[in-house]
Image (tube, rainbow, N blue to C red):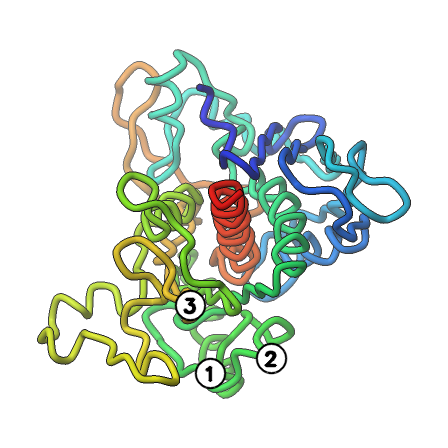
């Protein structure tokens, strides 16, 4: 296995590098008859594309998607859905000085160890740019889920160690930073400006919630829904931690506090994040991801060169100050892919 395919019944295979001709992918397993157009996918890609917002890189990419197959007269045909996104604004020369040194916090040194060579131009396959293909594939999954009454929303609940309440989750999609609370925006903006002037970067926390998820999704042991969700979200390059429901807070609670009471109307709380024993319980599926600071910083860092000699590096080029909000649609996309796969697994098992 090459590690470029996700999913069993509903799968996405991706390809492409940051400074290659472009990125793309193939979605397999999507049933026929699902409404799908380039405009639907483009709307999600526009939320992820570079060059927008106070935290984003100066790189400008239109990220225009082309549907190559699997769609006819506005609906899916049931065959493989191929798509392509061209790279148009590469400044590969910005990375020339990185040919013989390893950037701290990046995959340079590990790709060298694995393959015996690496693409130094923006990190190649390890670049955050590869997530464009995930977002495109996730947009297809989202349309399939919509046909089953499932909606997935992602939003930001923390930037630079400054958390916010969840007062306007329904409006976060159009809010700066995809913030779950509008009043936190100027506070986050001030923090971003301060860190930018210091030549540094920020991390944050993104939450994702799926509503309309029926009870019964997930397999009993090795393919538990929460396990697959954690696997998918941890596969996003900047993510360093995943919580389901209350997550690590559950370790600090008593059983009487953590258990969700069951009433005739449903669960009285959702500490479990909509998943019990690895299977959805019919409540909203909720997860959070911890996103690390962007490792490309404009201050001196200690490293080594290809010969193992000590070196000092200051990373130039065009980089985000914070992966948020561009990572928010990626988190949503991976959640959609998991749920689409689990829905089809469940439907196949009940035939």
The label shown at residue 25 is none
In the displayed structure, 43 sits above or below 101; it is below
The residue wearing badge 3 is 282
What element does badge 3 sit on?
loop
Estimate the x, y position of residue 281 in percent, counting from the top left. Answer: 37, 65
CA separation in Å, label 3 and label 1 = 31 Å
The residue wearing badge 2 is 171
* Residue depth check, mark 3 versus mark 1: number of the one nearer the observer: 3
Question: As drawn, is 295 to the left or to the right of 60?
Answer: left
CA separation in Å, label 2 and label 1 = 14 Å
Taking depth in this image into account, of 340 and 336 the one nearest to the observer is 340
In the displayed structure, 234 sits above or below 169; it is above
Estimate the x, y position of residue 275 in percent, counting from the top left. Answer: 33, 61
In this view, the residue farthest toward the top is 116
Tell me the quarter of the image containing the N terminus: top left
Q: Look at the numbered discs 3 and 2 and tell me whether their residues touch, using CB distance below 8 Å.
A: no
Q: In which quarter of the image is residue 219?
A: top left
Estimate the x, y position of residue 77 in percent, counting from the top left. Answer: 79, 38
First of labels 3, 1 by sequence position: 1
Taking depth in this image into account, of 21 and 35 the one nearest to the observer is 35
Taking depth in this image into account, of 133 and 281 the one nearest to the observer is 281
Question: As drawn, is 231 to the left or to the right of 25?
Answer: left
The residue wearing badge 1 is 184
Q: Which residue is drawn at 75% across and 35% down?
A: 86
Q: Which residue is drawn at 82% across and 47% down?
A: 75
What element does badge 1 sit on?
helix
CA separation in Å, label 3 and label 2 = 24 Å
Label 2 environment density (alpha carbons within 10 Å; few <14, some 14–19, many ≥20):
some
């Amino acid at each position: 296995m090459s590690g470029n395919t996700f999913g069993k019944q509903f799968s996405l295979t991706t390809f492409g590098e940051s400074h290659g001709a472009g990125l793309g992918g193939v979605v397999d397993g999507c049933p026929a008859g699902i409404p799908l157009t380039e405009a639907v996918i483009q709307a999600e890609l526009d939320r992820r594309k570079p060059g927008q917002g106070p935290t984003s890189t100066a790189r400008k990419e239109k990220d225009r998607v082309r549907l190559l197959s699997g769609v006819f007269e506005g609906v899916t045909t049931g065959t493989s859905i191929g798509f392509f996104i061209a790279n148009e604004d590469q400044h590969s020369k910005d990375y020339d000085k990185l040919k013989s040194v390893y950037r701290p916090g990046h995959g340079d040194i590990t790709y060298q160890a694995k393959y015996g060579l690496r693409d130094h131009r923006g990190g190649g396959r390890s670049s955050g740019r590869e997530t464009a293909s995930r977002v495109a594939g996730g947009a297809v999954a989202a349309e399939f889920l919509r046909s089953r009454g499932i909606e997935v929303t992602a939003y930001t609940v923390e930037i630079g160690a400054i958390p916010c309440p969840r007062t306007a989750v329904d409006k976060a999609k159009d809010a700066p930073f995809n913030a779950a609370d509008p009043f936190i925006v100027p506070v986050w903006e001030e923090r971003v400006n301060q860190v930018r002037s210091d030549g540094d970067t920020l991390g944050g926390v993104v939450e994702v919630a799926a509503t309309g998820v029926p009870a019964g999704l997930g397999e009993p042991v090795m393919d538990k829904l929460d396990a697959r969700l954690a696997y998918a979200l941890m596969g996003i390059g900047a993510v360093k931690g995943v919580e389901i429901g209350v997550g690590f807070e559950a370790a600090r609670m008593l059983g009487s506090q953590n258990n969700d009471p069951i009433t005739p109307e449903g669960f009285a709380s959702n500490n479990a994040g909509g998943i019990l024993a690895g299977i959805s319980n019919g409540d909203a599926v909720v997860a959070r991801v911890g996103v690390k600071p962007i490792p490309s910083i404009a201050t001196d860092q200690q490293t080594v060169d290809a010969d193992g000699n000590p070196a000092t590096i200051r990373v130039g080029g065009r980089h985000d100050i914070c992966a948020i909000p561009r990572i928010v649609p990626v988190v949503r996309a991976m959640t959609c892919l998991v749920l689409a796969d689990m829905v089809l697994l469940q439907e196949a098992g009940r035939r």
